[in-house]
Image (cartoon, rainbow, N blue to C red):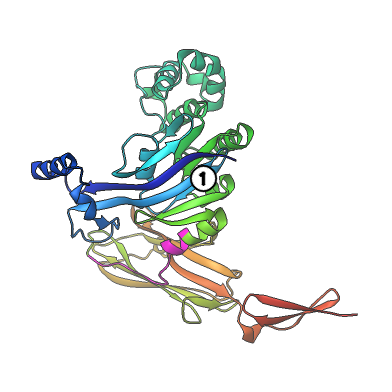
Amino acid sequence: MSVILKAENISKQYRLGEVGTGSLNHDLNRWWASLRGKEDPYIKVGAVNDRSAKATEDYVWALRDINFEVKTGEVLGIIGKNGAGKSTLLKILSRVTSPTTGSIKTRGRIASLLEVGTGFHGELSGRENIFMNGAILGMTKNEIRTKLDEIIDFSGCEMYIDTPVKRYSSGMTVRLGFAVAAHLEPEILVVDEVLAVGDAEFQKKAIGKMQDLSIGQGRTVLFVSHNMDSISVLTDRVIVLKNGLLHFDGDTDLGIKEYLKAEGSESNYKFEGLSNIPKITQIFVNTSLPSSIHEYGKEIKFVFNINLPFKVDNLALSFQILDETQNPITHLWIIDSKNNVNRGIGEYEFICGIQEPKLYMGNYTLRVHLSDSKSKEKFDFLDSVCSFKIQMMKSVRQDYQWQKGTCKYIEEGTWKVNKQN
């Protein structure tokens, strides 16, 4: 397959706390450097794009030296935590903004689904908005008219198609917006988190449509999502962005593992700072061995420290154990209201022990919720924290009979089969 898109040394710099370059002095310096054929003097400065760190410089690199190629008909996943630079990269690819350095080379038309439903007018009907939104996205009136019935059918909003959009639910609006955008005919389609909204039926239909675009029609798709299931289903290759840098480029399964490793690299979680709402301050995973490794089959304990700045009558703590692709394996919860117990101001510790965890060998993280079970108020939420690994130890391994051979454990990750005559 031929290369349809190539990103060469893409970097994007922003000034913190200001719009544009921030001052007339900096603009003059840039102008004077350009006049003399020199490079921008502020390209040599700038902090790494780490949103959790305290700013020490005036400039930050949202992206730095990004290089990759995409082939015709390929579906490329782009993943990374919030603030890693994914949206900035898509805006550059979509020509919404220009890079500070580097270039994008493409063959064919690019269409972007960065904001599904952008351009909808509440006073206009769904039908009228299809024509207006299609025009915004680059479709001609004849193209829209030819595909109108197909768009309406795909959206599932036929009953309300002549009703003003202001009476639509948010889910119906997203359905209609995606239906319009999905029926574009570009060579390259850029999609940003459209599958994070809508019900299960819509998400299934949207995934099917994107598969049809790539496999059935041979179109190239760049797909950004935090949903690892969708990434796994739709893509064969991913790039992982971390702090504005290209951290990984390769096979989807390996890329997802790299992303999750970066997201939940710490075996324990600790919150630094003050909060005026109930907060999870620490989480410990009591693994049986160092380096966050837990022996298969043995009891595992999870310890949660919680700070309450005010009284909570129905405090609820729940957590899920997630596998390597962020699928929830089990869900556990502690709800005080069940025992009619109130919690006053102070520090509390919850301990959850699982005597015989049904966790097979592999890597796991936690997703944790802290809320009021009665009012449904959400206090704290942590995702992909406290990484730990389940592993079978040599001490508990034995010889296993398998058909006509004997499987013996030799070393970590290696099995030897002794054939029998």
- Numbered label tally: 1
Binning the other alpha carbons within 10 Å of mark 1 as few (below 14), some (14 to 19) or many (20 upward) gives: many
Q: Which residues are magenta?
A: 259-273
Q: Is residue 333 visible?
A: no
Pinpoint residue 113: horizontal percent, then vertical percent.
43, 34
**Of 69 and 129, which appears nearest the observer?**
69
Please name whichever residue, 141 or 389, is drawn nearer the observer in this view of the structure: 141
Residue 123 locus on image (x, y percent): 34, 18
Name above or below for residue 127 compared with residue 287: above
Which residue carries the number 1 mark? 76
Image quadrant in which you'd find residue 119: top left
- The picture places residue 283, in percent across and down from the top left corner, at 38, 70
Q: Quadrant of the C terminus?
A: bottom right
What SS does tag 1 mark?
A: strand
Q: Is residue 289 visible?
A: yes
Residue 251, x across and y down, in percent: 56, 55
Task: Specify the quadrant of the image occupied by residue 6.
Answer: top left
Q: Is residue 230 magenta?
A: no
Residue shown at 19% from the left, 50% from the top = 42
Can you say which quadrant of the picture contains the N terminus? top right
Q: Would residue 2 be found to the left or right of residue 258 on screen?
A: right
Residue type at the position of mark 1: Leu
At 26% from the left and 67% from the top, the residue drawn is 272
Give the residue displayed 40% in from the left and 40% down from the top: 104
Q: Residue at x 36, y 47 (%)?
A: 10
Q: Residue furthest front?
A: 36
Q: Nearer the viewer, residue 125 or 213?
A: 213
